[in-house]
Image (cartoon, rainbow, N blue to C red):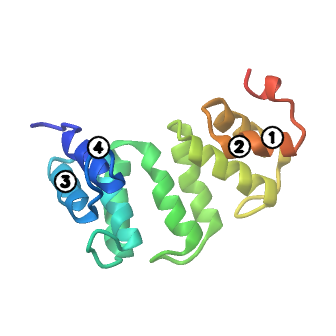
Amino acid sequence: MGHSMAPHAVGVMYYGGHGVQKDDAEAVRWYRMGVEIGHAWAQAALGSVYRLGRGGLQQDYSEAMRLYTLAAKQDAMWFISIGYMHGEGLGVPQSYETACRYYEMAAAAGSMEAQYNLGVNYEYGAGVPVNLPLAIEYYRKAAAQGQEQARATLLRLRVPLRESLA
């Protein structure tokens, strides 16, 4: 089966109730199949289920972090999940500075959510020095990919959208 996306895709269907009866436990079963074949998206999805304690699983931040790390080794965009864990202090000491280091790696890989998070951190000085021009740069990158909160933030900051999405 290689690194087929099928187990992850079926898991997403069950987790969200898309075309099937919503069933978190069945989603977990499919995500586990994806994890067994080394699929990064399945690793990250199962990590999120452990982080939230859903699908009949006990909330387990250590297991979530382990799965996010496996996913990030294959696709740097999953560093956002590790950054989130650090930013919220979930199973690790809370540190915006550490979160920003992980967000930087995910943003460089094209994660619009990481780009938005970095915009927020640079706008408010959470873990990094306040730097509004850099915050706007990250908001622009995220908005250009369709991240609606970044777009709304650019409007709030009175940054012309036409320029920001060029």
Residue 76 makes an appearance in the image: yes
Of labels 2 and 4, earlier in sequence is 4
> Which residue is at the far top?
166
> Which residue is at the far left?
1
Residue under circle 4? 19
Cβ atoms at labels 3 and 4 below 8 Å apart: no
Residue located at (19% from left, 57% from top): 32
Residue under circle 1? 154
What's the distance in space between the residues labelled 1 and 3, CA to CA?
39 Å
- Secondary structure at numbered mark 4: loop
Nearest to viewer (mark 2 / mark 4)? 4
Cβ atoms at labels 3 and 2 below 8 Å apart: no
Nearest to viewer (mark 1 / mark 3)? 3
Task: Decide if residue 32 is on the left or right side of residue 84.
Answer: left
Cβ atoms at labels 4 and 1 below 8 Å apart: no
Could you tell me residue 17's position as x and y percent?
Answer: 33, 52
Towards the viewer: 21 or 113? 21
Task: Decide if residue 103 is on the left or right side of residue 59.
Answer: right
Towards the viewer: 161 or 25? 25
Of labels 1 and 3, earlier in sequence is 3
Residue located at (40% from left, 69% from top): 51
Residue located at (38% from left, 62% from top): 48
**Disc number for residue 150:** 2
Could you tell me residue 71's position as x and y percent?
Answer: 33, 51
Residue under circle 3? 30
Of labels 3 and 4, earlier in sequence is 4
- Secondary structure at numbered mark 2: helix
What's the distance in space between the residues labelled 3 and 2, CA to CA?
33 Å
Mark 2 belongs to which amino acid? Ala
- Secondary structure at numbered mark 3: helix
Mark 3 belongs to which amino acid? Trp
